[in-house]
Image (tube, helix red, strand yellow):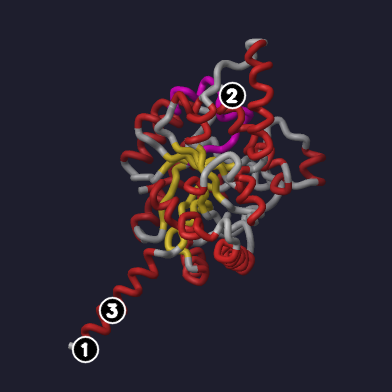
Amino acid sequence: MIRLKATIIAMAFAATSAAQGVTDVHSHIITPEYLTTLEKEGRMMDEGFPLPKYDAETHLKWMDEAGIQTSVLTLAAPQPTSAQTVRQANEAAAKLKQKYPTRFMFCAALPLPDVKAAIHEAVYALDTLKANGIKLATNVSGQYLGAPELDTLFSVLNERKAIVILHPHRPEPVNRSVMQQTTLAMQEYLSETTRAVINMISRNLLARYPDIKVIVPHCGAYLPLAIPRMKSLAPVMQAHKMVGKIDWEANLNNLYYDLAGAHSPEVIRMLLTITTQSHLLYGSDYPYAAPQALTASLARMKEYLTSEPGLAPYKEAILYKNARKLFK
């Protein structure tokens, strides 16, 4: 009887520990078919740097070592325009979710800029593959989020109350000489993310489709600086009929922010000027950095979320509670 009680207690403790494991909303799947397509199209270096290797077993090993319970998978950059390649990637992610239901979720890629094909894939991914959301590139071949032709897609996503994870991709057009000197990940990805979100806000997109929740990557990019500037200039733009009325509260209420990249207490405090702690989420960007570096980064976040008086109350929310509430 004593041994049985001890076993039950141990199992309960293990279950509690698992329940409190970190949820990572920013990780990437890189499939062999995806790599083959990029190689055939001569696009392996489209983003200015080589793609890392990926396999689920190595990912799970790192998750176990770092204390991450669940990771949300999205397809890496560059964005394939082939509907077949996108379908293969989504089905590969769905199989991982099915095989490891407590460890992996995924947000499906779409074959933009073909809006009709993208809608077809979104419906299939959400309804049949049971995707947890949709991943959208900031732009595909110059078609930026917020473009009017994407409204029909957003209408479909709104009907399904979809979660959308954004990810920056190479801007179009791009200055290749600048890209070679300063890699996209160092600066332009932040501009690209800001550009796409501001473009959506300027068209009141997230207010018009209020059941879509959007996760902005990399600590919100430049949005803590850009949004106050945009608010100050909006009356002038509206007076010249360059933009319409913007429902700031409705747009901003639908934005969430992952903390992948150069997070810090200062960055979190900046984000809190445009959002609330309930909209902050942990993200790793696995496998784009060495596992040791990502583990150290997460440990550093846990340390300052424990020691910083103004942030300590938000620790569990940022590490897992907000994500679990968002993804239900």
Taking the spot 47% from the left edge, 23% from the top edge, the residue there is: 151
Whole-percent x and y of residue 304?
A: 60, 63
Q: What distance separates the C-alpha of mark 2 from that of mark 3?
A: 54 Å
Q: What distance separates the C-alpha of mark 2 from that of mark 1?
A: 65 Å
In the image, residue 153 lies in the stretch drawn in magenta: yes
The amino acid marked with disc number 2 is Ser
Residue under label 3: 9
Examine the image and state in which quarter residue 142 appears. Answer: top right
Q: Is residue 3 left or right of residue 286?
A: left
Residue under label 1: 2
Camera-side residue of 98 and 138: 138
10 Å crowding of disc 2: few (<14), some (14-19), many (20+): many
10 Å crowding of disc 1: few (<14), some (14-19), many (20+): few
Q: Quadrant of the N terminus?
A: bottom left
Per the rendered image, the range of residues in magenta is: 135-154
Q: Secondary structure at mark 2?
A: helix
Q: Secondary structure at mark 1?
A: helix
Residue under label 2: 202
Q: Is residue 175 left or right of residue 74?
A: right
Whole-percent x and y of residue 230?
A: 66, 27
Whole-percent x and y of residue 79?
A: 57, 40
The amino acid marked with disc number 1 is Ile
Camera-side residue of 235 and 205: 235
Going from N to C along the chain, the mark reached first, 3 or 1, is 1
